[in-house]
Image (cartoon, rainbow, N blue to C red):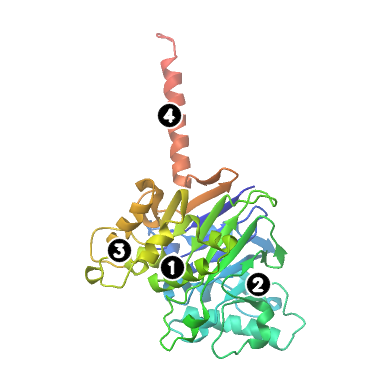
Amino acid sequence: MTDKIKYYPVGNGDQSLIILKDQTTIQIDCNIRQASHDENQKDFFDVKKDFLSILKKRDNNTFIDVFVLSHGDCDHTRGFKKNYYQGDPSEYNKENREANEIIIDEMWFSPMIAEEHTNTDEDAYQQEAERRLALHLKKDANKDLPGNRIRIIGYDGDKKYKDLDHLRSIPGTVINTFNNKTQTTFSIFIHSPFKEQLLAAEKDKNSTSIVFQARFKNNEKDKNFNCLAMFAGDADYIAWGIILQKTISSGKDETEKALYWDLFLAPHHCSWTFFNDTPQEENKEPKDDSLEILRYRRNGGRIISSSKKIIDNDDNPPHFAAKEEYLKTLEKESDFFNTAIEPNEDSPEPILFKISSNGIEKEKTESEIKKDRLKAATAVAAGAIIKQPWGY
């Protein structure tokens, strides 16, 4: 078995899945669109169906080990309320099972989400997080059971959860325990959000996105990582500038490794906001800090834009000028991937990277595999016809 990362085609939105060697699953964000269930909508990939084919079952109930919500915007939370179970896991019943509601064993919760609700899915996520936190605050006997587990990422301005610091992971923390299981070849380095972002008078969800680096090793004793993958929600150039400066100023070589990347999910769906303010026409020069972040690319590094097709127009996101800047940092243009057009625009499929001792390798999609099989079968059939003796 190998570690894998799967980036789903969900338009201008995010949904990714990390699958570890032992089948531990870590979901980052959610954008399950209703139209994806319509077989006539070929350009809408059925994310839920694919998830159900991958996720494990316990007592015949589908569950995911960890759900990480970068921030609460609708293109990162869409479909949460309908597709994920909320409530006491002991009360999960036949109706929930028939609806294929997915149990989340462990939630990652940033207090920023509790500040302002802009959609019903964000509200549902926040309410489920508060239900779990309440169990911990009153030291309920079931607080650490699967379906009740929670990790706080970053600080909370009103110190509402000050008595739960044992559940808290702040920037600079390395996490290697997921759903009560310690991993020896996988970990996550938390970059953001920082306290000053959460306490700012004018808070911005994008700026306070959870940013982290996923770290993969082939063996426990390896000193080097065979893959480093960066996830950042909609973090803008301001957030990245803080991340860069704080990481470098730590003066620790080990900490600076947290800036390197092999896979980089372009923030905010390939928006110009990673590079500078908008509109881009008035802020044409990318910020030095953003360009410096990109220079931490390791050999063979790839960039993934989870967005609709990127074309040369006025859209933002995705932004054509942003893509052009990303291409400048890559070894070749084919190292840039757009989820909307892989393997083709008419019927996009998830982009899947396999992680092995040799680093990262893009796996072929289901349609590409079928095409190869058909091509091989056609070649064999043609060869058989050619070899038939004339006259027989």
Circles 1 and 2: CB atoms closer than 8 Å: no
Q: Earlier in the sequence, mark 4 or mark 1?
A: 1
Label 3 sits on a secondary structure element that is loop
Mark drawn on residue 319: 3
The answer for how far apart the CA atoms under marks 3 and 2 are is: 45 Å
Circles 1 and 3: CB atoms closer than 8 Å: no
Identify the residue position indicated by label 4 in the image. 378
Image height of 163 relative to 383, above or below: below
| Residue 381 visible in the shown view | yes
Q: Earlier in the sequence, mark 4 or mark 2?
A: 2
Identify the residue position indicated by label 2 in the image. 94
Q: Nearer the viewer, mark 3 or mark 2?
A: 3
Q: Earlier in the sequence, mark 1 or mark 3?
A: 1
Q: Nearer the viewer, mark 4 or mark 2?
A: 4
Q: Quadrant of residue 68?
A: bottom right
Q: Earlier in the sequence, mark 3 or mark 4?
A: 3
Amino acid type of the residue that numbered disc 4 sits on in the rendered structure: Thr
Residue 264's x, y, as percent?
A: 45, 58
Image height of 46 relative to 123, above or below: above
Image height of 81 relative to 64, above or below: below
How would you rate the neighbour count of disc 1 (Cα within 10 Å): few for under 14, some for 14-19, many for 20 or more? Answer: some
Q: Nearer the viewer, mark 1 or mark 2?
A: 1
Amino acid type of the residue that numbered disc 1 sits on in the rendered structure: Arg
Identify the residue position indicated by label 1 in the image. 33
- The answer to whether residue 355 is left or right of residue 292 is right
Amino acid type of the residue that numbered disc 3 sits on in the rendered structure: His
Residue 327's x, y, as percent?
A: 34, 53
Residue 9's x, y, as percent?
A: 42, 59
Residue drawn at 37 percent across, 46 percent down: 334
